[in-house]
Image: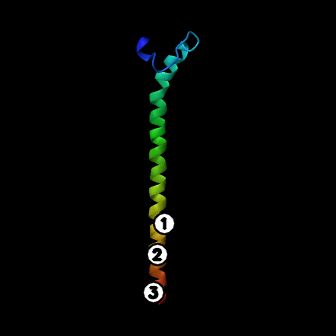
Amino acid sequence: MSYFSFLFPITSHYSFLLPFIFYYFPLLHCYFIFLLASFSLIIVIYLTFLFIVIVFLICITSLKI
């Protein structure tokens, strides 16, 4: 317990939280990485779609001229 004493002000009523924190923190970390990856994938798909639409509009306007 002395190894983690610099992380928390450990008293008797805080010590029961330690197993939950050290068990759920890696799971939350994986979940946040998954959210970040899916969010960046959505951004990439949106930017690709926007690029295709812009190129399509440029082609249409250049054909009219």
Residue that badge 3 annotates: 63
Mark nearer the N terminus (3 vs 1):
1
User: How many C-alpha atoms fall within 10 Å of the one at disc 3: few (<14), some, or many (≥20)?
Assistant: few
Q: Amino acid at mark 2?
A: Phe
Query: Can you say whether 48 is above or below 11 in the image?
Result: below
Quadrant assignment for the N terminus: top left
Give percent across and percent down for residue 62: 45, 85
Q: Say what secondary structure mark 3 lies in.
A: helix
Mark nearer the N terminus (1 vs 2):
1
Give percent across and percent down for residue 2: 42, 12
Give percent across and percent down for residue 52: 45, 69
Q: Amino acid at mark 1?
A: Leu
* Number of residue marks: 3
Label 3 to label 2, Cα distance in Å? Answer: 11 Å
Label 3 to label 1, Cα distance in Å? Answer: 20 Å
Residue plotted at (45% across, 52% down): 41
Q: Amino acid at mark 3?
A: Leu
Give percent across and percent down for residue 24: 49, 26
